[in-house]
Image (cartoon, rainbow, N blue to C red):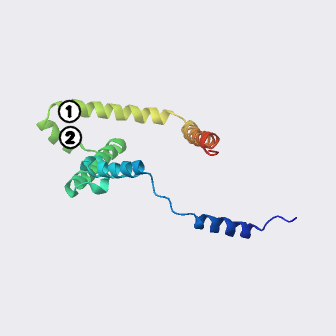
Amino acid sequence: MTPPDHHDLERLVDQTLRDLPPRRAPRSLETRVLAAIAARAALPWWRKSFTYWPQPARIGFVGVSLAIVAAHFWVLTGLDVSALGAAIAAKFSWLGAVATLGATIREFCQVVLRSIPPIWLYGGLALVASSYAALFGLGATAYRALYANR
């Protein structure tokens, strides 16, 4: 007795499944799906995806984001912003203390980062990357062990 050819078996299963009558979804499932679609449509714009936001809100968000990135760049690279700082400090006197604190923190971070040997920084980066890979691997293994055979 010879085993059936895989192509014959595939054709047999395909034909058997095509001969089955189409099934209608349960009424409760249809109601829940339509309710979920209506609830998603009723969400306010700020709870939806960025592409659904109004144009002024998107422009404002991008502008504020770019301003934050620019401020971080100035702080991290140590660009001379004393003229801008002086103009702002004239309007807001308390900002002088905040600017001094920011400069002190930046200098402290630069000194600390310069004192750490580069091999330690690369080792820490490798540790974080390997921990992430191990977490991903363990998660995939747990998923496969718990749900794949059901």
Residue at point 25% right, 34% down? 99
Circle 1 Cα neighbour tier, 10 Å, few/some/many (<14 / 14–19 / ≥20): some
Dot 2 lies on which element? Answer: helix
Q: Circles 1 and 2: CB distance less than 8 Å?
A: yes
Q: Which residue is mark 1?
A: 96
Where in the figure is residue 43, as x and y percent of width and height? 27, 48
Res 79 seen here? no
Q: Is residue 109 left or right of residue 1?
A: left
- Cα–Cα gap, marks 1 and 2: 8 Å
Q: Which of these two is toward me, 146 or 50?
A: 146
Q: Which of these two is toward me, 127 or 6?
A: 6
Where in the figure is residue 76, as x and y percent of width and height? 36, 42
Residue at point 12% right, 37% down? 90
Q: Which residue is mark 2?
A: 85
Q: Residue furthest front?
A: 21
Q: For the residue marked with disc 1, what is the amino acid?
A: Gly
Question: Nearer the N terminus, badge 1 or badge 2?
Answer: 2
Where in the figure is residue 87, as x and y percent of width and height? 15, 42
Q: Residue furthest right?
A: 1
Which image quarter: residue 1? bottom right
